[in-house]
Amino acid sequence: MKTYLKVMSLFFAAILLAGLFAGCQGKKAPAAPAQTGGKPSGTVKVLMGASNQATQTIALLKTEFKEMYPDITVEVDLMGSTEIHAKYLTEFASGNSEYDIVNSRHMYKNQLALSKFIVDITPYLDKSTVISRDTYKSSFSKFNVQIDGRWWGLPWRSDAKLFMYNDDLYKQAGIAGPPKTYDELIKVSNKIMAETGKYGIVIPADGRWILQAFTDYITTVDDMAFFNAKMEPVFNHPDKVKAIEVFKELYKVAPKGAVTYDHSMAVTSFIQGEAAQLPMWPFAFSESLDPTKSSIVGKVVIAPAMPAVNQQCVVLTGWNMVMTSFSKNKDAAWLVMEYMSSPKTERQVILNGGDTCPVCVDSGNDAEVVKAFPIVKGILDAMDSEKFYADYDIPEWAACALIIQDYLAKAVSGEMNSQAAMDAAAKDVRQVLADAGYYK
């Protein structure tokens, strides 16, 4: 029943995204008014994803921001990364929302803008004396918040998939450095388990996490795409399907039940020293430095390769702050967004123990930040990569992703033959896109 409810909640979110956004002409969002001028005041309500970064940002909103703008009260609601989208999508589709600002991922940008649920903040940005278009890497801001040169939000959090390993366990197993291919990863993982008695690797596979693992793999083959130029599914090509057999081998040297782990369970396993290797977003590195959570403080090394085991492609994603069209206090909301996404705030958040997920160019040039967290520069440099993968910015991607992950789970568990499972997924995904008119 628990699994069923989780799937249904994800399905509901997918339907909201793919259906309600596409056909909500009857639910008109209020028009975005021009800036009112004067001194902004009043309450600004924010919906944010829970994280160390959010915790540190909220602390600064209560102190430094309040000193700067004593007439503005900021109220923040925190939610999990899955629940948050269902929350605001439901509100938006109903024609009303209590939030002035929401924390949204890049993949929803076009749908939110098209439905007029969020505000084009370009006029605010171009008048700002705190931030500018050049505050952020152009490649990153383009896919995260821009549409045809207009800005529909501000970058707030970057995520580049990293490959982390426990250096102590590497040394105990006599391993000189991280693997460079998945074949090497299997061998290294088996050697660690044989020499140390610890698990070789932990990869979360519950729900959408198996899809992320699959995405990591396909970025290491020549064609990293799920679809070709005509939007025909290609993720069932044998070169990609091989990933499933690789995962089956890796789960043999992973903690028992790892196929049911979500990201937090996988991180806990790694930072408690149970498993030696972990492909994960940067927040895991931050948690490895927290002595209240981690038993391997100072022992974690980030491999120079991104994402998991080679440098052909970077897996990127991003969280942004967007202003809702339902906000009745847009000028004050802008000041909150501007503050949260500024270089000064990002610097303080990182140094105060927030996650190392930079979006501001200045962070990569800050000697103190880079000395404390060298990966900050690495993540910003990764944004300049010639090849990077990000989730598809189409209304149907959420529904397609749900189909793919469902068949991936069946294949990894052995319920279905790997190739047959992915062929079935490709057939179902193609039908979703055909119904949406992609092949006319």
Image (spheres, helix red, strand yellow):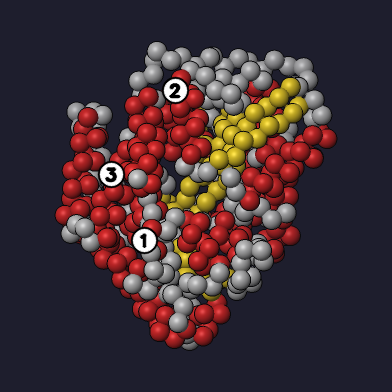
Q: Quadrant of residue 427?
A: top left
Q: Quadrant of residue 151?
A: top right
Marks 2 and 1: which is nearer the front? 1
- Mark before the other along the chain sequence, 2 or 1: 2
- Mark before the other along the chain sequence, 1 or 3: 1
Q: Report the residue at 39% width, 29% height from top.
A: 16
Q: Which mark is residue 259?
A: 1
Q: Report the residue at 44% width, 86% height from top.
A: 195
Please, what secondary structure does the residue beneath circle 2 have? helix
Dot 3 corresponds to which residue?
Answer: 403
Between the C-alphas of marks 2 and 3, the distance is 23 Å
- Kind of residue sitting beneath label 3: Ile
Q: Report the residue at 59% width, 52% height from top.
A: 357
Q: How many marks?
A: 3
Q: Looking at the image, is 91 positioned above or below residue 260?
A: above
Quadrant location, the N terminus: top left
- Mark before the other along the chain sequence, 2 or 3: 2
Q: Which mark is residue 93?
A: 2
Between the C-alphas of marks 2 and 1, the distance is 34 Å
In depth, the one of 73 and 219 nearer the eye is 73
Residue 177 appears in the picture as rendered:
yes
Label 3 environment density (alpha carbons within 10 Å; few <14, some 14–19, many ≥20):
many
- Kind of residue sitting beneath label 2: Ala
Q: Position of residue 156 (x, y in %)?
A: 60, 42
Q: Which mark is residue 188?
A: none
Between the C-alphas of marks 1 and 3, the distance is 18 Å
Q: Position of residue 254 (x, y in %)?
A: 40, 70
Label 2 environment density (alpha carbons within 10 Å; few <14, some 14–19, many ≥20):
many
Q: Position of residue 245 (x, y in %)?
A: 26, 66
